[in-house]
Amino acid sequence: MLMARQLANPFPDHLLAVVAFWACLLFLGDGLVATPNAVTVSAHLLGSIAVACAVFRILELSHPDTGVIRLSPSQVDRLVLRPGDEADAEPETGGSTDRVALRT
């Protein structure tokens, strides 16, 4: 399962190029029309940071086993299980699920 997830590239490169080109055209078109003052410059700066963070997150989460943001493989495998396979799945050893009674 891990090898299949690592070999697959869920985010196509040409889609990233189209989205980046589209964002550049939008910022260029708006920047040419807007008057350069502190509000428009800061709005363009914050907008470009937001687009860059969104692209970074998409690229990071397209490979969940490597990179800065890593997902636990056991949790991803648990999400992939079919509903009928839940009874056959191995229990996780991450923590205790016993409840502790509190004395009052």
Image: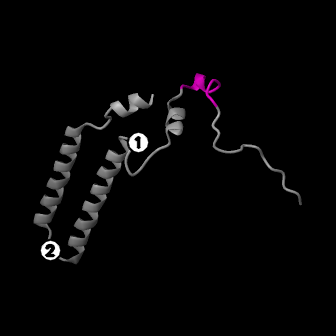
Q: Kindly indicate whether the residue at mark 1 contacts the one at mark 2 (C-beta within 8 angstroms).
A: no
Image quadrant assignment for residue 31: bottom left
Residue 19: mark: none
Horizontal and vertical percent position of residue 4: 39, 28
- Residue 87 among those drawn in magenta: yes
- The vertical placement of 11 against 48, above or below, is above
Disc 2 on helix, strand or loop?
Answer: loop
Main structural element of the magenta stretch: helix, strand or loop? loop
Q: Is residue 85 above or below residue 47?
A: above
Identity of the residue drawn at 21% across and 71% down: 41
| Quarter of the rendering occupied by the N terminus | top left
**Residue 24 painted magenta:** no
Location of the C terminus (image quadrant): bottom right
Q: Is residue 55 left or right of residue 79?
A: left
Q: Which mark is residue 36?
A: 2
Range of residues picked out in magenta = 82-90
Residue 33 against residue 69 in the figure, above or below: below
Residue 18 pos. (x, y %): 18, 43
Query: Camera-side residue: 51 or 94?
Result: 94
Residue 36 drawn at (x, y percent): 15, 74
**Mark sitting on residue 64:** 1
Q: Secondary structure at mark 1?
A: loop
Q: Residues within 10 Å of mark 1 (few under 14, many from 20)?
A: some
Q: Residue at x 17, y 59 (%)?
A: 27
In the image, what residue type sits under mark 2? Answer: Pro
